Image (cartoon, rainbow, N blue to C red):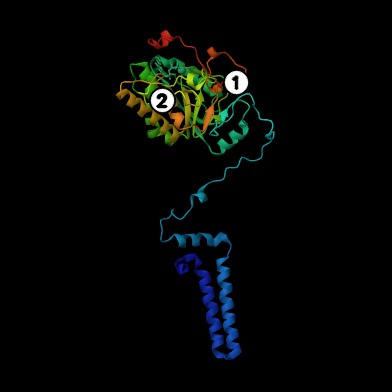
Amino acid sequence: MLLNKCSSTREPMETSAWVLTSLDSRTDKNCNGKKCLLSMLFINAVFIIVFFWYENKPIRWHYESRLRCRQEPRNTTEDISPLNLSTEVAIGRMLYDKPQIFKPPRSDVLMVTPWLAPIIWNGSYNIDILNAQFHQRNVRVGITVFAMKKYTVFIKTFIETAEQFFMVGHKVNYYVFTDRADDISNFTLPEGRQLVILEVPSYKQWQEVSMRRMEMIRDKANQRFYKEVDYLVCVDVDMRFSDFVGVEILSDVFGTIHPGFYNAQRGSFTYERRQKSTAYIPTDEGDFYYAGGYFGGTVEEVYKLTNFCHKAIMTDKHNSIEAIWHDESHLNKYFLYHKPTRILSPEYLWDNNFGVPQFLKRRRFVAVPKNHNEIRNKRAL
Ligand code: 5GW
Ligand code: MN
């Protein structure tokens, strides 16, 4: 009796009622034996035909009214499966070489972790396919960078080289955290790319400057990044892009292999080894030594990561201990028990002091040599 409530389904009911009345008037006059039975059968047949006709009408015009009827007693969204809301993402026809089962594109390096996260090396992916997929999703990427105190000098090269190589053809928000907004020059950026300066308080100690990045990224993720971007890429500023870095790096949560430890034994990783620190990792655990200066993922995953690291840093502070490599030690602890879904090879974070080994086909993001005394004043290396 749901049908009665539906305005647009009234029509078939009226039609069947009309058929019934006209038949009734006929059967009244001649109702004897066989004829009566035949009339009854005829009425039933008409009823059945009308019923099935209604039920199987083309979806075009009766789908909507049926949906409304069934939903009536309920909340409007409750009855629609989320599967119906998903939109199709198709990349269209593309021409490229077929993947070959017995010819892996790289056999000189590890391309997948034991938990099946890809490790991103040059030659292991087709950027055209990835670009097509990410363009379909209309993805916007945020890149966070800290330029505190004298480190504002790195911003110009950082942005200029990023404009040449970082997420070319995609939407990008640069988020520059600084205590010296006046030192950041204006950049004219093309449509779809913008620079956002975030003024933040400075800290006296350089260790604190580095570690507080976790807290500040967490807070901004919570306040605004989630509204503005899909992914975050969090990097050091004393760097220059020297080759393409694109959507191949994007995944739920990713870390980068530190250029100084890609081939080291786990016992030689410079993890925090004192049990008193929350960043402690025993010598028989660990997958990679991840760099503190390059991680990212979806805004939600970066929020979880930075929240975890900030809280751990605060616990250590409360217990009067500071992890050996500060935020980097906590990041390594996080990734040990929350495995990254993608790992960037050292192509994505290189320092020319380590030379140029054979396996390194690209140097995409390279440390800018800095005069430690001049730029930092305090830290001696
Ligand atoms: C200052 C003195 C010693 C160490 C770091 C700083 C410092 C770091 C600073 O004064 N201002 C600043 O913005 N930073 C941020 O922290 C930069 O984004 C920098 O890239 C990041 C990490 O510090 P780095 O790059 O000096 O650390 P390493 O391990 O890459 O040399
Ligand atoms: Mn650095």
Three-letter residue code for mark 2: His
Q: Quadrant of the C terminus?
A: top left
Distance of mark 1 from mark 2, alpha carbons? 28 Å
Distance from mark 2 CB to nearest ligand 1 atom below 8 Å: no
The front one of 18 and 42 is: 42
Whole-percent x, y for residue 280 in the image: 40, 24
Q: Residue furthest front?
A: 284
The residue where tag 1 is placed is 362
Q: Nearer the viewer, mark 1 or mark 2?
A: 2
> Taking 27 as reference, is 71 above or below it?
above
The front one of 359 and 204 is: 359
Q: How many numbered circles are shown? A: 2
Three-letter residue code for mark 1: Arg
The residue where tag 2 is placed is 330
Q: Is residue 299 left or right of residue 344?
A: left
| Res 37 quadrant in image | bottom right
Whole-percent x, y for residue 244 in the image: 57, 24
Sequence-wise, which precedes: disc 1 or disc 2?
2
Secondary structure at badge 2 equals helix
Whole-percent x, y for residue 292 in the image: 45, 22
| Res 281 quadrant in image | top left
